[in-house]
Image (tube, helix red, strand yellow):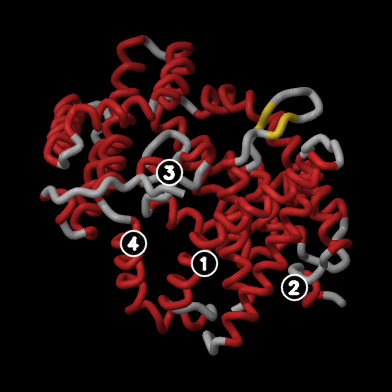
Amino acid sequence: MRSIAQMAMFAALVAVLGQLPAIPLAGGVPITLQTLGVILAGAVLGPWRGAGAIVLLHVLVAAGLPLLAHGSGGLGAFAGPSAGFALGWIPGAFLVGLITQASWPLRLWRTITGAVLGGIVVVYACGLPVMAFQMGLDLQQAALINLAFLPGDLVKAGIAVALTHSLARAYPAPFTHARRRRQ
Amino acid sequence: MIPLYRHGTSHLHRMPVGAKFLGIFVAALAASVFRESLGVLLSIWTVTLLGFLLSGTRVRGLFAQLWRLKWLVLVLTIPQLIFLTPAEAGFNVARVLAVVMLAALFTLTTATSDILSSVERVLRPLDPVLLRGGLSAERISLALSLTIRSVPVILSFYADIREAQRARGMRPTPRATVLPLLVMSLRHAEETAEALAARGVR
């Protein structure tokens, strides 16, 4: 029952992070924090519950709630060109959790690898083909367009890594997947 | 949190959720498979426009929906104009918009609660499979309603954090905002789990 409550809470957290007024970074560039939430879901809850939280979010979005970034949602969110990215969050969060929580205490290099592979590589690998197909471009052209988002995503992955390690020290209770593996 | 659903009594509103969903799925599939076909594109647009007129949202609702998609159109069009001819770009944008508008029609005319109860109905026969992963249709729909309930709770946590930051004259950096939000949310999840266990929900 605890995992159900945690998944529900994290699904809501990812939704809320997408709605917050974009927090200005040091450089003054505003970004939404929704994908930060996706990486955190995997890193904090582990692969199964992390991916489960994203599935919950997507079911509610498809059911007509405006929970994606800036109040978008509804079934239309899965028909547009960015559908692949949103769906890629599910395997993405899973992989982040799998790599990050492979040992306890968490290791920094593992968390970084997990955040970059799961949070960026997997999400792009799912998102780019859908985007290219929808827009009638080839993969390289789609990748070129998405290059604009890469710096922001790298920054978010970095923030997620720092937050995960702070949380592991401050409140290690939710990291059950990692702690069960090596105590 | 306001659902995107608009109440109404049209035929579209009264159609079974499953049939409506299947229809949109087939239309989206047709648009992807016959991507070059003008006929398919025109028939999807005809169905979509008719649907909007029949759903009682009338022309104003249609334009409101199109206006919601203005950023999508912009994001779609500009990169395509770099790589493709205007005619190709226009055709692609029209195709994506048709499917998105049709999906929006589903969202406009189907109550969120109806969709969620259909999801539970579909999942119920799968219970034996789900139980192996520690899940069940009941647990999944509990998780879905917990999520809906948690959104305002987390928003109020966020308001508390911002207030505390303002009182101390702090800048709302992502780290200073999200870390307390994480701890408060996870503690709240713990309390919710205990409350559910105390009420005998397993």
**Tag 1 subunit:** B
Contact between marks 1 and 4 (CB within 8 A): the answer is no
Q: Amino acid at mark 2?
A: Thr
A99 is higher (above) or lower (below) than B104: below
- 3D distance between C-alphas at marks 3 and 4: 15 Å
Residue contact between numbered discs 2 and 1, judged by CB atoms under 8 Å? no
**Badge 3: few (under 14), some or many (20 or more) residues near its Cα, within 10 Å?**
many
Q: Indicate the secondary structure of the residue bearing disc 2.
A: helix
Which residue occupies 30% across, 42% down? B103
* Residue with the mark numbered 3: A73
In this rendering, position of residue B112 left or right of residue A11: left
Dot 3 falls on which chain?
A
Q: Are marks 3 and 4 on the same chain?
A: no
Q: Residue B82: x and y, percent? A: 48, 11
Query: Which residue in the rendered view is the most extreme toward the front?
Result: B167
B33 left or right, relative to A178: left
Query: Which label lies toward us, 4 or 2?
Result: 4
Q: Which residue is mark 4?
A: B113
Q: Are marks 3 and 2 in contact (CB under 8 Å)?
A: no
Please name whichever residue, A16 or A11, is drawn nearer the observer in this view of the structure: A16
Could you give the CA–CA distance between mark 1 and mark 4, rounded to whole angstroms? 14 Å
